Every structure is written in structure tokens, then in C-alpha cells.
Image: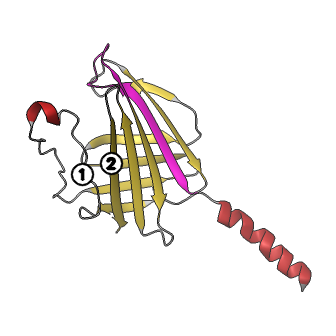
């Protein structure tokens, strides 16, 4: 009986050490999400209504494997991140600069760090955005905390999404 209990405990250890499963369709809980700060607010005095604004339904789809995470949503091109912790260099959306992205799973948290020129043009200031993805204990709620660092400011954003 004692050997059986030890074997059961040993079998459960790898399961508890597995990475979080972010697979699925996620819908933003606008009431619990902190609106995305607009860094040029001091210039315009009125933040623009970006596509997929805070009052619109925002749906994100995640396909995760043991080696990568793919994310699709209405605001971005399809994003695919190898989650091995190695930096990858690609072109910005404008094609005029480089972006370095590093994604890694650490236990039940996915961290994605992106470093790129702010504005997409060569010679611009650099922005570093660090996303931390965490699931609720029951796996039905995803919280993405993003810290964007520019030379003059640090912006914080919290997105709460519910699994559909």
C-alpha cells in the first residue's frame, strides 16, 4: 500500500509542474479590464477610439502547443511565439525597423517581452513591452498584465478575459 501511495505521488508531480494551458477563445471582460493608456494623450487631450475599443467585444483566440503559442485577435496580425525563451528578431509592421520578441513559460505563467522602435521608424525611441499571462485556478479567466516602458514614461495595462 505504501509503494502504491508513493507511486501515485510521483505520478502526480509532473502533472502539477506542467505549464498553463492558454488554448481557447477568450472574450475581454471590459468592466474588469483597465483601459489601455494612450501615450500621446497630452497632445490630443482626447484619447482616440481605437479599433476594438474598450466598449466593443474583443475576442482573442489562442492555440498553444508544447513549443509555441499562436494568438489571433482583431487588433493585430497573427502572432506566433516560440516559448523557448530565445529572442527572435523580425521586421516591424511598417517593415522599417526590427522588433525583438522573447517568449517563455515559467510554471503557469507566460511572459512575452517585445522590444521595438516606438512608431516603427528607424531612429525612434525604443519601447519595451512585457506581457505576463496568468490563469485563474479554475482556468476560466486569463489576466494579461502589460508594462510598456518608454524613455519618458511607464504604462500599465490589465486585460481580464473569460474563456468561452
Quadrant in which the C terminus is drawn: bottom left
- At label 1, counting other C-alpha atoms closer than 10 Å, the crowd grade (few under 14, some 14-19, many 20 or more) is some
Q: What is the number of the mark on residue 23?
A: none
- Quadrant (top left, top right, bottom left, bottom right) of the N terminus: bottom right
Q: For this view, does 83 lie left or right of residue 118?
A: right
Q: Residue at x 15, y 33 (%)?
A: 42
Specify the quadrant of the image occupied by residue 159: bottom left
The residue indicated by pointer 1 is: 35
Residue name at image x 56 percent, y 57 percent: 108
| Quadrant of the image occupied by residue 59 | bottom left
Determine the residue positioned at 57% across, 33% down: 86
Residue 129 in picture, x, y percent from top left = 39, 36
- The reply to whether the C-beta atoms of the residues labelled 2 and 1 are less than 8 Å apart is yes
- Tell me where the magenta segment starts and ends, as one range: 108-127
Q: Position of residue 52 (x, y in %)?
A: 19, 50
As drawn, the label of residue 157 is 2
- Tell me which label, 2 or 1, sits earlier in the chain: 1
Percent of width and height locating residue 151 = 35, 25
- In whole angstroms, how far apart are the C-alphas of marks 2 and 1? 7 Å
| 1 falls in the magenta region | no
Local crowd at mark 2 within 10 Å, few (<14), some, or many (≥20)?
Answer: some
Instruction: Specify whether 23 is left or right of 44.
Output: right
Q: Is residue 120 above or below residue 147?
A: above
x and y percentages locating residue 98 in the rendered image: 39, 21
Q: Is residue 83 placed above or below 96 in the rendered structure?
A: below
Please name whichever residue, 100 or 45, is drawn nearer the observer in this view of the structure.
Answer: 45
Q: Nearer the viewer, residue 155 or 92?
A: 155
Residue 111 painted magenta: yes
Q: Secondary structure at mark 2?
A: strand
Compared with 79, 153 (above or below) is above
Amino acid at each position: 500500500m505504501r509503494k502504491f501511495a508513493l507511486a501515485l505521488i510521483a505520478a502526480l508531480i509532473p502533472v502539477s509542474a506542467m505549464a498553463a494551458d492558454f488554448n481557447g477563445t477568450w472574450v475581454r471582460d471590459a468592466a474588469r479590464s483597465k483601459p489601455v493608456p494612450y501615450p500621446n494623450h497630452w497632445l490630443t487631450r482626447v484619447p482616440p477610439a481605437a479599433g476594438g475599443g474598450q466598449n466593443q467585444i474583443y475576442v482573442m483566440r489562442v492555440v498553444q502547443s508544447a513549443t509555441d503559442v499562436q494568438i489571433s485577435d482583431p487588433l493585430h496580425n497573427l502572432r506566433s511565439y516560440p516559448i523557448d525563451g530565445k529572442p527572435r528578431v523580425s521586421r516591424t509592421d511598417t517593415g522599417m525597423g526590427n522588433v525583438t520578441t522573447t517568449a517563455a513559460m515559467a510554471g503557469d505563467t507566460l511572459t512575452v517581452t517585445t522590444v521595438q522602435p516606438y512608431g516603427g521608424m528607424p531612429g525612434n525611441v525604443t519601447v519595451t513591452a512585457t506581457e505576463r499571462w496568468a490563469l485563474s485556478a479554475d482556468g476560466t479567466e486569463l489576466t494579461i498584465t502589460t508594462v510598456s516602458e518608454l524613455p519618458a514614461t511607464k504604462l500599465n495595462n490589465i486585460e481580464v478575459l473569460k474563456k468561452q
